[in-house]
Amino acid sequence: MNIPLHISQIHESRFNQKPLIVRSPGRINLIGEHTDYNNGFVLPAATDKAVYITLSASTDATCHWFAADFSDEFTTTLDVLQPSPKNWPNYLLGIVEQFQKMGHSIPAFNCVVSGDVPAGGGMSSSAALECATGWGLANLFNIQLDKLTLTRMAQRSENEFVGLQCGIMDMFASAFGRHNEVIRLDCRSLEYEYFPLDLADYQIVLFDTGVKHSLASSEYNTRRQECEAGVALLQTLESDIHSLRDVSEEMLLTHQRKFDPLIFVRCLYVVQENERLLAACEDLKRGDLETFGQRMYGSHNGLRDMYEVSCKELDYLVSFTTTEKSVLGARMMGGGFGGCTINIIKADAVDDLFERIQKAYKIAMGLDLKMYKVSIEDGTSILSI
Ligand code: GAF
């Protein structure tokens, strides 16, 4: 289906207005997990799976929003913003609130939302919806906005309105993505570099566990607090420590005995993952995909054993690939506790592997496995159809 055309037709028939159409993609992350809120590095990219919204100014001072994929309507005014139990409108409301905090009053608007980012797949459809809303409203109401401000607004909106203390990776990737390139983002300075991703005869494939365990967001916020506790302790022992980015493995080991063991292992994972990512970027520059793939497994092991954000379904899928010659690397992707694994697989072996892993997963977990072959595409943009 041509989603932008479809939702613009819905928009025209519901509101009798020609809308602005915005596309904002879901993201993948090759390596560097749970490093963004520790001021470290990440290596994401925007994908062909995206959120699409249509927008037009409302004629009756009330916002009329419609989630086309599950036929759900939402109406509101924008004077007092309250989180909705429906959840999806909160990603739009949070962005409106950010505009208001920046001193822009946003008139009521009509909107249709749709997309093909797998829900709960860990590709961050939420960041994509936030970026689409911010970019679209700025265009609709002639507000000057650059993409860096957009990503900061989207992150604050998620932190303050939705209540997830996420880092900036997801919105940055959605906004700044570029066709066939991954982004090495320094989450401290927000400096970034694009790396062409030449996978030769390999392909990026996501395996979707089909589960999203309910502790995902509470454990996410707990991990943040654990890292902050580690930083607070280190600040009493060393100078110039602002985040785990300022900490080396050697420094951590020197102070190990002063740490609560759990806090220590969390911090150690983050410090090692950051180092792993920097080394992985060098692998990419040399075109050494084999070593890159091994580092993906290293990342998964750390997330499973040290950071403890994996789950049995993710572990099963990653472990299955370790004996497959056609797979260079695999790991859980995103916050954890469900969602997708990201895999680098020889293109001509993907379908055969999927058939076998799907059967095995069904027997082992009783669940249907889904697969997405993803391509790397451009970030948030206004579409013309
Ligand atoms: C989620 C968060 F939203 C990101 O900011 C990031 O921390 C990620 O989990 C883990 O790397 O997607």
Image (tube, helix red, strand yellow):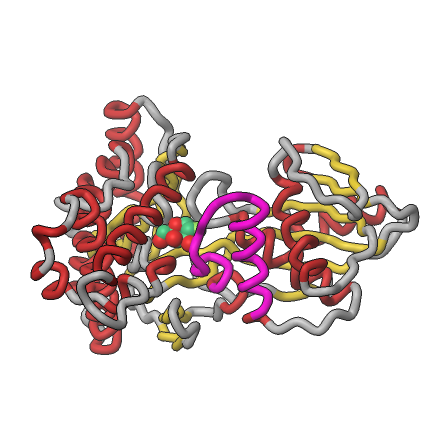
- Residue at position x 23%, y 45% in the image: 307
Q: Nearer the viewer, residue 195 or 334?
A: 334
Position of residue 87 relative to residue 55, above or below, is above
Q: Quadrant of the C terminus?
A: bottom right
Specify the farthest residue to the front: 236
Q: Nearer the viewer, residue 240 or 323?
A: 240
In the rendered picture of this protein, how many numbered marks are placed on residues? Answer: 0
Specify the farthest residue to the right: 60
Q: Nearer the viewer, residue 212 or 325?
A: 212
Residue 147 shown in magenta: no
- Residue at position x 24%, y 29% in the image: 360
Residue 368 place in picture, x, y as percent: 37, 29
Residue 266 place in picture, x, y as percent: 22, 49
Residue 148 place in picture, x, y as percent: 55, 71
Relative to residue 284, is residue 187 drawn left or right?
A: right
Q: Nearer the viewer, residue 333 or 243?
A: 243
Tell me which segment is drawn in magenta: 149-172
Residue 284 place in picture, x, y as percent: 25, 72
- Residue at position x 19%, y 52% in the image: 297
Relative to residue 247, is residue 371 drawn left or right?
A: right
Residue 52 in sight from this viewpoint:
yes
Relative to residue 171, is residue 254 drawn left or right?
A: left
Q: Main secondary structure of the magenta part?
A: helix
- Residue at position x 71%, y 73% in the image: 144
Give the image quarter of residue 20. bottom right
